[in-house]
Amino acid sequence: MSPPVSSGAPVQERRLGVLLSHLRPCAPPAARRGNHHHHHHHDLRVREAEGTGGLAASPCAADGSGETSGGQRCVFCEIVKGNKPAYKLYEDDVCLCILDTKPLSTGHSLIIPKRHFPSLQATPPSVIAAICCKLPLLSSAIVKATQCDAFNVLVNNGKVAGQVIFHTHVHLIPRRKGDNLWSSETYERNSIKHNQETKDLVSGIKELLFPPQDDSAEGSTIPKEL
């Protein structure tokens, strides 16, 4: 079991806690505690919270139902609530990091918000910021634990992009030299064309980012052309 983690604990101790916690699976209460499901489910969550510095599961769906638009239960919402098993690496008030159940490499992990957002566009900037600011801590621990050479940070946003579970999540994928994980990494890439089509693309994107008289863009500046 990982050591207790408090707000005053040294950074090194917190990192050690993250590193060790992936050895402890969060299995369904019925499988670990017998048939008294409801009572033992509560006890297990309380014990786990005490053992990990108060990191207990909490409801994640924005509407409280944890259902997708198709009426099915969201697997990530169920994991956050403690209704489905997962290997939990890290948890705070906003996000949860777990091992991927179908990893591309050893240590392949997912960082998910505890509330249900179906896409990156639907996820509030504050939640995305909370996830991103944990990347250095989590990647450092995972890289050391797996003794890998590097890692990819990946978001599959939308069905065509490979998103399977429509609850925003960020992949953290450990890499090793020669693992040949993606064939596209060996493709020869063409240089960008400095033509009118490229200029029109840049102008179109800027118009969407910096529309006239848009207060949301206040304080930002339109970058100069190359």
Image (spheres, grey):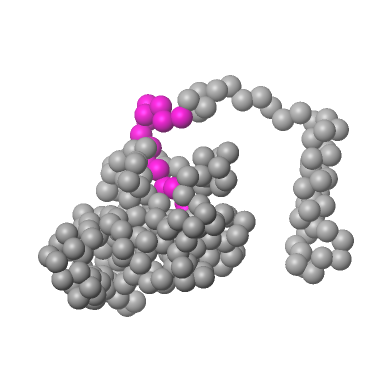
In magenta, the rendered stretch is 169-182
The vertical placement of 102 against 1, above or below, is: above
For the point 79% across and 43% down, the residue is: 202
For the point 35% across and 67% down, the residue is: 81
For the residue pair 137 and 107, the one nearer the viewer reads as 107
Asked if residue 174 is among those painted magenta in the image, a careful observer would answer yes
Asked if residue 157 is among those painted magenta in the image, a careful observer would answer no
For the point 45% across and 56% down, the residue is: 72
x and y percent of residue 48 in the render?
23, 70
x and y percent of residue 132 in the render?
50, 58
Quarter of the image that includes the C terminus: top right
The vertical placement of 6 against 128, above or below, is: below
Residue 136 image-quadrant placement: bottom left
Quarter of the image that includes the N terminus: bottom left
Is residue 143 among the parts visible in the rendering? no
For the residue pair 120 and 85, the one nearer the viewer reads as 85
For the point 22% across and 58% down, the residue is: 27
The vertical placement of 169 against 217, above or below, is: above
115 sits to left or right of 220: left
Residue lying at the far front of the rendered structure:
71
201 sits to left or right of 143: right
Residue 199 image-quadrant placement: top right
25 sits to left or right of 167: left
For the residue pair 225 and 187, the one nearer the viewer reads as 187
